[in-house]
Image (cartoon, rainbow, N blue to C red):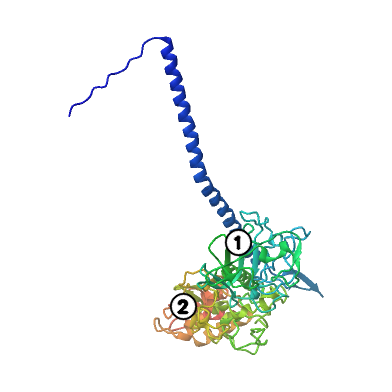
Amino acid sequence: MRLRTIPLIMTTGKPGSQRALRQRGQALLLALLVLGVAGGAVLFSYYRPATLTLESDQKTTDALALVKTALIGWTVKRGNVCTTQSSNGASWVECTGTQRPGELPCPDLKAPTDINYGTAEGTCSSGRLGRVPWRTLGIPEPKDSAGETLWYAVAGPFRIRGVNDNPLNSDTRGNITVYAADGTTVLTSQAVAVIFAPGRVLGTQNRSSASAACTTSPSSPVARNRCATNYLETAGATPRNNATTNGPFINGQLSATFNDRVAYLTTAEFMPAVEKRVANEVKAWLDGYRANSTCQCYPWAADFSINTGDAASPDYATPSNSPRINRGRFPTSDADPEDWGQNALPQLSSWFKYNNWSTVIYYALAKQNADNQGSSCTTCTGVTLSVDGKAVISAIFFTPGTPLVGITRPSNTLANYLEDAANNDNANDTYVTPTATAPDRDRLYTSISSPAAVDTSQQCRTMGRALRRITPCGQPPKLNPACAALAGTDLNGNALTPAQGLQVCSSACAAAALTLVNPPCQNTTRPSVCRNARETLEEC
């Protein structure tokens, strides 16, 4: 193939020709500039709507998340206000009121122009639809990308007391159903609350302040901006209408006829925070009892079968004529050896009692931290409680989490509350940290403290005189077991840890006991050191 040669055209140096070239170059640059601007406009028009959509979606998502967090934060702060009362020289703490952890506010049914707009109604039916009571929750007004305030429905079992007086505790489940976009797949049937971002006006919706009939309002006609049908729509192959009191609701696909964004709070999401609040209270009550009781001990546990109340309001007690047990339910009345609220002892909040929290909390105390060091305990299998092989625990309690599928509660079967075999046998003082990792499963709380105070005028003197009578104690490792138990040692004469027997008494009594179970006193009491030890025990 022959190559054609294209001659290079050279310009002359004449001024007219140069001006023409400059003009043509400027025209070319201008054309390129125009094309660049036009192209940028095309690209801007292509990408900007997507950016706006993402920003709008994020604003709505943030608002929904804010409300979920605020609902949990509001409920865990609920509870009685306790005050110190006094009379005739005696003082006690008194806790009254109707607030309780776990309850949620009613929606706001008021128009935006109302002076109390943003506050919860004083009463509401189950699943009643209304705007989020943002002032009550203590948050800024939550709005979606369309500038609309979020709406909200609360499950009947979690409404405030006075509207719903049924007990509210770990056994309580949400009962609102939320469907996926197809209208048949259940996302949850245990929603505690459902939150809606209504979006912009669709179809025939009218959000004016004019009054009109409203199928979702018990006081119809109402202002159109108070009617859920003007904000929430229907979707799904099996139609589900979000403007229906108590649902079921749908998290539908966005379309020309449906633009609700839906978030929901399940029982499993909600209850762990409530249980943690309750657990903090229980821990404080136990610590207060231990520090302020005369015995400096924990209260005896209540047997599952000892109930001084009725089926609706069980009151688990440890009356003075009941067996002394160290494992069972948390005692709510007739606590022994001293009752709640006596002298400087803490007073249980009324919400703890009337919401039957004692039915779901399993409690155990160590023998050494019981009254008189557990000398009357009928169930103790060790001096301390053991958790994960560490025998240093003074008291424990469990919160059970929400009921698993197929489990019926309340129940007298511990396995319906605690899942690990080591924890639900109720047979000994050995436990393990729960193996379940889900947030709504059973959780263990522990306390480590020194042994309970000993009445040196009675118990130590009794043990000291008993050991004195049965000496000599024999040669280790065949030490008389009765001697070892009284002296607080093993069969080799070594003091046990934590301290037991005479080792928890005065240092003189503890030393005298060790002397009598070790050389030279195992087989004879003639040496002066042995005689002196026996005399010391006489005065313990």
Residue 89 seen: no
Reading the image, the residue beneath label 1 is 69
Residue 178 location in percent, x, y? 56, 70
Q: Label 2 is placed on what type of residue?
A: Asp
Q: Residue furthest left?
A: 1
Under circle 2, the secondary element is loop
The quarter holding residue 110 reads: bottom right
Residue found at x 61% / y 57%: 63
| Residue 393 drawn above or below residue 253 | below
Q: Residue furthest right?
A: 88
The quarter holding residue 205 reads: bottom right
Under circle 1, the secondary element is helix
Front-most of 192 and 473?
192
Return the disc, 2 or 1, that comes first in the chain's sequence: 1
- How far apart are the two marked residues, 2 and 1, measured between alpha carbons? 31 Å
Residue found at x 72% / y 64%: 226
